[in-house]
Amino acid sequence: MSSPAHITSAPPAREAAAPRLGRLTLFTVCACVMVAQSMVAAVNLLIPQLSSSALRPTATQLMWTVDAYVIAFAGLLIPAGAAADRHGRKGALLTGLALFAAGAASSALAATPEMLIAGRAVCGTGAALITPATMSILVHLAGETKRRARAMTAWTLALGLGGALGNLGGGLAGEFLSWRALFWAMVPLAALLAGAVARVVPRTERVDRGSPDPLGTLLVTAALVAILFGIIEGPVYGWVSARILVAFGLGALLAAAFTAHARRSRAPLFDPRVFRSARLRAATLGLAVSFFGLFSLFFVNSQYLQGVKGYGPALTGVAIMPVTVGMALAPKLAARWQARPRPVITAGLALIGAGLLGTSTAGPHTPYGVYVLWLLVISFGTGTCMPALTIGVLTSLPAHQAGLGSGLGTASRELGAALGVAVTGTVLSGAGRDFAAGMSSALVLVGALTLLATVAVAAGYRERV
């Protein structure tokens, strides 16, 4: 018979070890965000085919086919990130993939332009759930600082690759398949990713604090949608037209209403006083500026290569792929100085601005090799600053708000991207039929604004709070 001492000497049962971030989990999560980001740009190369399709969309309907995804995506990012923290990040990711697949299927089956636009909006809603949930999962699984930095580097690389791969996929579908094929391809891809997520992504601890904030969610979402509408439609209706001024005014009014509500609420969607941190303000500005420059490039690239250089859609998609090289290589070099983010971020944003100024010199007779050189400069700049800026947003917020931090950061990126396309489109429309001259003027302006904003970001990183 065992003695009591023998019984009590057994070590107490320990809590199950916290799940760790494995390579298969990292790959799966990054693949999800890559697919979500790819659909921002993929449709751009299908516009000529869509315009001559049986749907017969008007110019306004074509514009909304492109913009519905971006507006739903960016407008819902902040509440989607907060919802993932509160209700479960893995569940939010699986729900996002299901909505993404449903939206893609609806787009592929669309019999009218309105159905296509609605399908794109559903896709964008799914992407808004996918993107912050993926980052929040990585933050909670990565653990210690160095592993977290590597995970964020992989996540930001996937984000950049998604834009480039979207151009490639759209170009291939536009030249060899139909526009419906691109949307059909997303359905089994999303299902495959959902199966992988269910199998290899562990659940993370939820935030059990307070109650949902439906009014705050409505206010911040409506504010973002109004501002995005103004940015996207500004080149179409004119920046000082009544419609655009009302949109911006409404966005500002709703943002102010959210701030007042959040300051009074016991459990707000997020506390706007977090922006008292100079580091957080600088990091969100830096993310917006990086995508402001990058998507200005993406906007003119396909038109330059097809309309000026005479490339086909597929070759155009391939021709921009060198932009992924710097995004893949630069983070590994920049990681050596991760303890000193300010010079890394300043150098990266400055390279983006300088690369845009260099790209502005491209014309009909510019060799592709010279054009690629400037693409690589922009690419290395993006790869250098993006991980540090992403980490800057996350470290400015408590760890339990990683999903919200991802939503804030990604909303900044998408607002910057929309503004870059809007500014570039406005300058191009003013140039008339001389696209090369308009492209040069647009990229000079965007490059100069990027360099000016770099100074403001660097100043924000000088402060410790």
Image: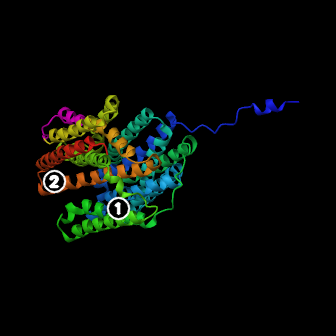
| Residue at which label 1 appears | 54
Q: Is residue 1 above or below residue 103?
A: above
Whether tag 1 and tag 2 are in contact, CB under 8 A, the answer is no
Q: Amino acid at mark 2?
A: Leu
Looking at the rendered structure, the secondary structure element under dot 1 is: loop
Q: Residue at x 23, y 51 (%)?
A: 420
* Residue type (three-letter) at the residue carrying disc 1: Ala
Magenta span includes 67 = no
Residue 346 spot, x, y in % from top left: 24, 38
Q: Which residues are magenta?
A: 361-377
Checking the image for residue 79, the label placed there is none
| Residue 321 appears in the picture as rendered | no
Residue 55 position, x and y percent, is 35, 63
Coordinates of residue 91 in the picture (x, y in percent): 53, 52
**Residue 59 higher or lower than 340, as above or below:** below
Q: Around disc 2, counting alpha carbons within 10 Å, would you say few (fewer than 14), some (14 to 19), or many (20 or more)?
A: many
- Looking at this view, is 333 or 260 the one in front? 260
Mark 1 crowdedness (10 Å alpha carbons): few <14, some 14-19, many ≥20: few
- Count of marks, rendered view: 2
Residue in the picture at 31% in, 62% down: 64
Which residue position is annotated with label 2? 428
> Which residue occupies the foreground of this view, 315 or 120?
120
Residue positioned 22% across, 56% down in the render: 422
Identify whether 55 is placed above or below 443: below
Q: Quadrant of the N terminus?
A: top right
In depth, the one of 425 and 290 nearer the eye is 290
Where is residue 102 drawn, in percent x and y? 48, 57
Judged from this view, the residue extending furthest toward the right is: 1
User: Magenta segment: does it hold 370?
Assistant: yes
